[in-house]
């Protein structure tokens, strides 16, 4: 696979901003369909070459205001970064949790889209 990205749409239904700026420590945990941990990494919005971080291509530039909605695109195409899903079959189910610097958290699931293979 030459390029893989994960698009997340998040909405702030709380009563304070969600920290999503390039200086915020946002951690995410990604598991496969067997609940095996694929990666547990920080998002990095400034440098796509930092090994051990997941690069946030877009949407990680400013905090998310109350009632705001944001599209976030994570680049997970580099196998050396640990969150690479290229070895998984299409339609594989994945589970994730995101911790926004201890302010709030979210999670969910998705399946690998055959169109991105």
Image (cartoon, rainbow, N blue to C red):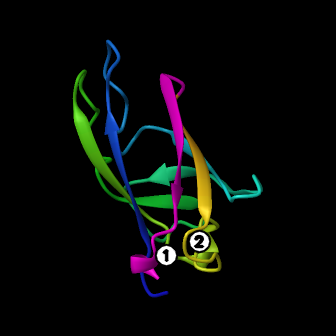
Residue stretch rendered in magenta on the structure:
102-117
Residue closer to the observer: 67 or 55: 67
Residue closer to the observer: 64 or 34: 34
Q: Are marks 1 and 2 in contact (CB under 8 Å)?
A: yes
For marks 1 and 2, the one nearer the N-term is 1
Magenta residue check for 97: no
For the question of whether residue 61 can be seen, the reply is no
Residue closer to the observer: 116 or 55: 116
Residue at 23% of width from left, 26% of height from top?
65
Farthest residue to the bottom: give it: 2
Residue 5 occupies which quadrant of the picture?
A: bottom left
Element type at marker 2?
loop
Residue 7 occupies which quadrant of the picture?
A: bottom left
- Look at mark 1 in the image and give the residue it sits on: 77
Residue closer to the observer: 60 or 6: 6
Residue 84 - label: 2
- Give x and y (percent) for residue 93: 60, 59
- Give x and y (percent) for residue 96: 58, 47
- Packing grade of label 1 (10 A; few <14, some 14-19, many >=20) is many
- Give x and y (percent) for residue 58: 29, 56
Element type at marker 1?
loop
For the question of whether residue 19 can be seen, the reply is yes
Residue at 36% of width from left, 27% of height from top?
18
Does residue 16 lie above or below 44 as drawn? above
Residues under labels 1 and 2: Cα distance?
6 Å
């Amino acid at each position: 696979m030459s390029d893989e990205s994960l698009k997340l749409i998040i909405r702030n239904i709380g009563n304070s901003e969600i920290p999503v700026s390039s200086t915020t420590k946002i951690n995410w945990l990604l598991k496969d369909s067997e609940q095996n941990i694929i990666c547990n990494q920080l998002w990095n919005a400034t440098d796509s070459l930092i090994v051990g971080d997941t690069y946030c291509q877009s949407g990680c530039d400013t905090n998310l205001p109350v009632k705001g909605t944001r599209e976030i695109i994570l680049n997970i195409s580099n196998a050396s970064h640990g969150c690479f899903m290229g070895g998984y079959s299409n339609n594989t189910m994945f589970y994730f949790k995101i911790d926004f610097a201890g302010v709030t958290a979210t999670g969910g699931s998705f399946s690998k889209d055959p169109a991105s293979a």
